[in-house]
Amino acid sequence: MRAPICISNRPWSRGRRFYGCSQLEENRCNFFQWYNKEEDNGVVEDLKDDLEMLQIKIRKFEIENKELKELVKSLKAKSVKRRNKAIFYKLAFFTSWIVYVLVKFGL
């Protein structure tokens, strides 16, 4: 597991970079190492790779989001059709009941 590069906010080392475990604040891990400038080239390349991977993930999420929105739209349309069909059947039943009563009682 790679430790992220953090920036110190302590008064005696403010702004200085260091490697620290992501769980350092919760006191679950005590890994700590000062960052050296000679490591910049590797870090920059790693960050470029990470950025590219994140852009790919964003694109996948955008596609998935579009598909889910289309699914929701389709389900809403089906729901409206079912509701309209239910209203139609209720009206048909009510109308036939009224006709039955009128015929039965000769009104």
Image: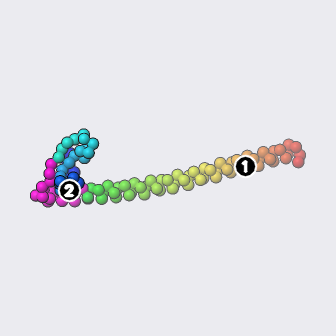
Instruction: Give the distance between the C-alpha atoms of the residues marked 1 and 2, in whole angstroms.
Output: 78 Å
Comparing labels 1 and 2, the label whose residue is closer to the camera: 2
Position of 84 relative to 104 (above/below): below
**Residue 16 part of the magenta-drawn span:** no
x 42%, y 57%: residue = 66
Q: Which residues are magenta?
A: 33-50
Position of 58 relative to 103 (above/below): below
Of callouts 1 and 2, the N-terminal one: 2
**What residue sits right under mark 2 in the picture?**
14
Q: Residues within 10 Å of mark 2 (few under 14, many from 20)?
A: few
Position of 44 relative to 92 (above/below): below
**What residue sits right under mark 1 in the picture?**
92
| Quadrant (top left, top right, bottom left, bottom right) of the N terminus | top left
Q: Amino acid at mark 1?
A: Ala
| Image side of residue 43 versus residue 58, left or right | left
Q: Give the x, y percent position of residue 30.
A: 20, 42
Please say whether residue 46 is visible from this viewpoint.
no
Which element is circle 1 on?
Answer: helix
Q: Residues within 10 Å of mark 1 (few under 14, many from 20)?
A: few
Q: Nearer the viewer, residue 68 or 105?
A: 68
Q: Nearer the viewer, residue 65 or 71?
A: 65
x 54%, y 53%: residue = 76
x 20%, y 58%: residue = 15
| Image side of residue 4 versus residue 85, left or right | left
User: How many numbered discs, if any?
Assistant: 2
- Looking at this rendering, what residue extends furthest in the front direction? 11
| Image side of residue 60 versus residue 101, left or right | left
Identify the colour scheme used: rainbow
Q: What's the magenta bit mostly, secondary-structure-wise?
A: helix
| Image side of residue 55 versus residue 93, left or right | left
- Looking at this rendering, what residue extends furthest in the left direction? 38
